[in-house]
Image: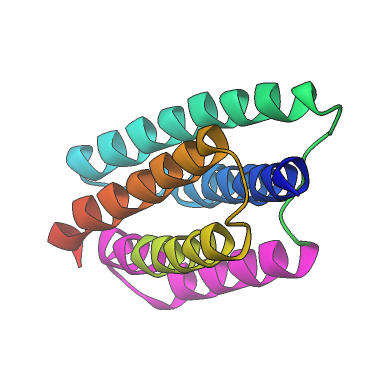
Amino acid sequence: MIEQDTVKLLRECDAGAKMGIRSIDEVLSRAIAPGMKKALSDCRAEHEKLGEEIRQELSRFQDKGKDPGAMAESMSWIKTEAMLMIKENDDAVIADLMTDGCGMGIKSLNRYLNQYEAADERSKDIAKRLIHLEQTLAEDMREYL
């Protein structure tokens, strides 16, 4: 049970890290404020680093990981493009989108932590660090709302 829950939790972390990177990639070039660009770039780099750690852990179990759901990615892209076309202040829109995305990520990852409670401590730590990344980015975005 421990191994099974560990792999499942790591897969969800893998999908979450990839979704975070893709979401940041969608908005980074449109950010105007230097502070916002730095916060997004730094968070993206941390997601990449944690994603590599997740994939290394998954490889111990001969698992290839998990990509974000196609529907979630499509809906995220559509919402991002629509909001950025309609609104004038890209930074405020980006902050709004990223804050919402971080909230969904935090909620999902906490749900998976509870669902896969038999996972090993190493994978739980990874999930908690990913949650912390999302919380930090959401806090960094507040000044641009």
Q: Is residue 119 visible?
A: yes
Q: Magenta span covers which residues?
A: 70-97
In this orientation, which residue lies closer to the viewer: 125 or 34? Answer: 125
Looking at the rendered structure, the number of numbered marks drawn on it comes to 0
Q: Residue at x 78, y 23 (%)?
A: 59
In this orientation, which residue lies closer to the viewer: 34 or 59? Answer: 59
Q: Residue at x 51, y 30 (%)?
A: 50
Q: Residue at x 77, y 39 (%)?
A: 65
Question: Is 64 displayed left or right of 41 in the figure?
Answer: right
When the figure is inspected, residue 81 is found, relative to residue 23, above or below; the finding is: below
- The magenta stretch spans residue 75: yes
Type of secondary structure dominating the magenta stretch: helix
**Farthest left residue?**
143
Can you say which quadrant of the picture contains the C terminus? Answer: bottom left
Question: Is 135 displayed left or right of 34 in the figure?
Answer: right
Q: Residue at x 61, y 24 (%)?
A: 52
